[in-house]
Amino acid sequence: MDSSFFVFLQKNPFNMVLFGTAVVTGGMLVWPLFGRLAGGAAPQVGAFEAVSLINRRDAVIIDVRDKADYAAGHVPNARHMPLAELAGRLAELEKFKARPLLVNCAPGAAAAKACTILKQAGFKEVFALRGGMSGWVEASLPVEK
C-alpha cells in the first residue's frame, strides 16, 4: 500500500476518526452475512413474508415463548410449545414435516435455538419470525388472546 495514505491519515486526527468509523460500520454491515454463511442462523422472515407463507403454503406457527407471554397475545392459530418443552414434543409436529414451520418468540435467541432443534429433527423449511411477537404487532397484524 502506498505510504501517502498513512500520511493522509496522520495529518489530521479527524481523518483517522473518519477512517475508523468507515471500518467499524462496514464490519457491522458484513457481520450478519458471516453468521448466515456459517449456517448457524435460521432464515428469518418479516411479518408480511410470514403471512404469505401462512396463506400460500399453509405454514405452521410455533410459539416458543413462556405460558404468560403466550396468554397475553399470540399469532392466530399458533401452537404453543415453550422452548424448554420443544425437544420432547417433536412427535406432535411430525405430521407437518412437508410444511414450512414459522417459529415465533420474544425478540432474542429463543427462536434461533428452536430452529436448530427443529432442523436437527429433520424439518427442512424452518423460519424465524424477524422481530418476534413485537414485529408482528408493529406490522398491525391480528393477535389472539
Image (spheres, rainbow, N blue to C red):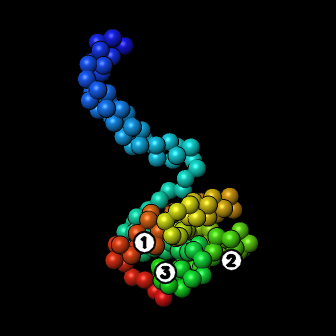
Is residue 145 in sight in this rendering? yes
Within the image, what quadrant is residue 123 found in?
bottom right
Question: Which of the two marks, 2 or 1, is nearer to us in this view?
Answer: 1
Question: Which of the two marks, 1 or 3, is nearer to us in this view?
Answer: 1
Circle 2/circle 1 CB separation < 8 Å:
no
- Could you tell me how far apart the alpha carbons at marks 2 and 3 are, in whole angstroms? 19 Å
Question: Which of the two marks, 2 or 3, is nearer to us in this view?
Answer: 3
Horizontally, residue 133 falls left or right of residue 68, namely left
- Could you tell me how far apart the alpha carbons at marks 1 and 3 are, in whole angstroms? 10 Å
- Closer to the chain start, of discs 2 and 1, is 2
Q: Label 3: which residue?
A: 74
Q: Label 1: which residue?
A: 134
Dot 2 amino acid type: Glu
- Closer to the chain start, of discs 2 and 3, is 3
Residue in the foreground of this view, choosing between 128 and 98: 128
Q: Label 2: which residue?
A: 92
- x and y percentages locating residue 96 in the rendered image: 61, 72
Q: How many marks?
A: 3
